Amino acid sequence: MAEVLTVAIGIGLAVSLLFSELFGLAAGGMVVPGYVALYLDQPLSILLTLLVAVVTYSVVHLLSTFVIIYGRRRTVSMILIGYIIRILMDFIPLGSFGTIDRIAGEESSLAVIGFIIPGLIAIWIDRQGMVETLTALLTASVAIRLILIMIYGVDLELVKL
């Protein structure tokens, strides 16, 4: 997995830079599209990650009505709260629900992607808007996944995990 992850992040950096230069949009952070591209075969994990990112954004936005949060504080708050929510999600037995097992399949593991990924996505939702961030992220991730398939072949899942 380490080699595929390394290549995915490298390609993700290039694609993120390309999106930023061509469209003026950040794809949820420089490394995020590479990680998400590796999980495109697990859409429920991606949805869960995006849900945690939106909750993180909402919590920090709510906190900013009571506490002065701007600049570095806002960035660190997004990453820290995303990290805490991600840790708390480990205590929720998501795989035990029958409907999720039927949708995801028994082989699929339902989990939030990474520990800082939701916070990075939340930062860009805050900076450029939800629709812009999520569409750029998903488009960049699909482009990265296609490049990875061209490099490693269709059986990318076997190489990944």
Image (cartoon, rainbow, N blue to C red):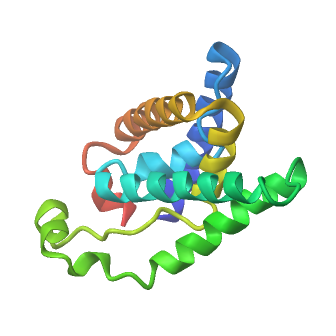
| Residue that sits furthest to the front in the current view | 66
* 148, 86: nearer the viewer: 86
Q: How many marks?
A: 0
- Asked which quadrant contains residue 66, the reply is bottom right
- Give coordinates of residue 31: x percent, y percent: 63, 47
Residue at image position (48%, 62%) is 113
- Asked which quadrant contains residue 93, the reply is bottom left
* 4, 99: nearer the viewer: 99
Residue 61 placement, left or right of 149: right
- Give coordinates of residue 140: x percent, y percent: 50, 32
Instruction: Work out whether residue 56 can be spotted.
Output: yes
- Asked which quadrant contains residue 86, the reply is bottom right
Quadrant showing the C terminus = bottom left
Residue 81 placement, left or right of 143: right
Residue 18 placement, left or right of 35: right
- Give coordinates of residue 41: x percent, y percent: 29, 51
Residue at image position (62%, 16%) is 23
Residue at image position (44%, 36%) is 138
- Give coordinates of residue 129: x percent, y percent: 61, 32
Instruction: Work out whether residue 42 can be spotted.
Output: no
Residue at image position (36%, 59%) is 45
